[in-house]
Image (tube, rainbow, N blue to C red):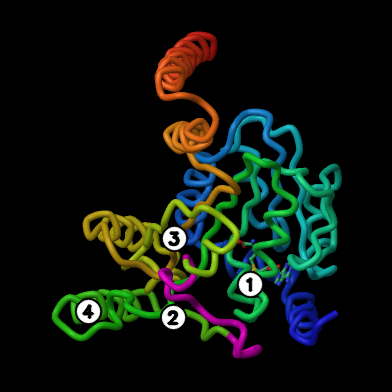
Amino acid sequence: MRDFEKDEILYEDSIAERYNRDYHGYLIMQAHDEDFAKFVSQHCHKGDRILDLGCGPASLWNLWKSFLPEPAQMVGVDLSEGMIKECEKLFPEDDFRVGSALKIPSDSGSFDLVIVSSILHHIPDEFLPDVFKEINRVLDEHGVVVGREPVSKGRLGDEPGWFSGAIMSFRHLVYRLTHTREYPEPAIGDYHHAYIPTEFLKLLSHSFSPKGVILKHPVSSYVLRSNNTLVAKIARLLDNSIGFGGHEFYYSASKNYYDSGDVMDCIEKELNTILDPDKKIEFMALLQKSAELLERELNTENG
Ligand SMILES: C[S@@+](CC[C@H](N)C(=O)[O-])C[C@H]1O[C@@H](n2cnc3c(N)ncnc32)[C@H](O)[C@@H]1O
């Protein structure tokens, strides 16, 4: 085991019992979690085998149960035994395993979707390529990885200007009215860090075809722990009205291809090498028709 993993286990074991309360027990955080679960659900299909990597104390498990359509299998893996014990207390029937993102305790190709919620920033950058390779290994050939991580630079509010001033005024107003402030995040190691999303994408693209990133929660992240219903409502309204920037980013990436357009591109590339042009056009037209038919039939079947 690597030194950073030993430090991480000590720290995560020590906060396992209070983690859900401190990090997910507030209205705005719950709204963020639900927003992320909706994003994940867009990448999930009925019957998928799903891995929640770095699942913590099953923090998002109930959301997976309500938002993800009838998975065939749900597995939670976490480095910290303390976290896994909490999972087992909360969901004694479910499948949780102690394991590292660098050595996931599962066979190759055994998942359709891997969810990575806020864990990579606990891992030093130099190990990220190996983590991505490991996620790639456990994904089936059509598999997808989705995740979220904190943003480091360029957050609204950090930049100079009136806009940041307005956000900070809002934050101070909330503090004055509700007397809540954010916890300072503990300095555990240099590896607990946030990302510049474009640099993260570059690393990810060595192992996957990324779809891109979406920045989230530009205002509400400043008042995460106020837990006042009206503050939460206003902060979320401001997030949506700004519609750009944020403290967190969501990403998704596929192991091989992304959507039907990409599948067609891949097939076309392959066909270029093996078929004469007329045959190719005929085949592609047939494939397109079949895809349309399939989509129509399945949509009718699913109501
Ligand atoms: C910030 S918590 C996130 C927990 C949960 N996914 C969530 O979104 O609330 C980070 C989790 O990642 C786990 N973790 C950190 N490094 C890991 C690694 N190398 N392999 C597996 N899990 C890891 C920690 O033990 C911790 O439970």
The CA distance from mark 4 to mark 2 is 18 Å
Dot 4 amino acid type: Ser
The tally of labels here is: 4
Comparing labels 4 and 1, the label whose residue is closer to the camera: 1
Task: Please tell me which residue is depicted at 75% across the width and 69% down the height of the picture.
Answer: 17
Q: Quadrant location of ligand 1? A: bottom right
Q: What is the number of the mark on residue 128?
A: 1
Task: Please tell me which residue is depicted at 46% across the width and 13% down the height of the picture.
Answer: 286
Which quadrant does the N terminus fall into? Answer: bottom right
**Label 4 SS:** helix
Q: In the rendered image, which residue does mark 3 sit on?
A: 28
Q: Which is nearer the N-term, disc 1 or disc 3?
A: 3
Mark 1 and mark 2 in contact (Cβ < 8 Å)? no
Dot 1 amino acid type: Leu
Dot 2 amino acid type: Arg
Q: In the rendered image, which residue does mark 4 sit on?
A: 164
**Label 1 SS:** helix
Q: What is the number of the mark on residue 181?
A: 2
The magenta-colored residue range is 186-201
Q: Which is nearer the N-term, disc 3 or disc 4?
A: 3
Residue 113 image position (x, y, % from top left): 64, 45
Q: Quadrant of residue 177?
A: bottom left
Q: What is the number of the mark on residue 75?
A: none
The CA distance from mark 2 to mark 1 is 32 Å
- Image height check: is 283 above or below 70? above
Q: Which is nearer the N-term, disc 2 or disc 1?
A: 1
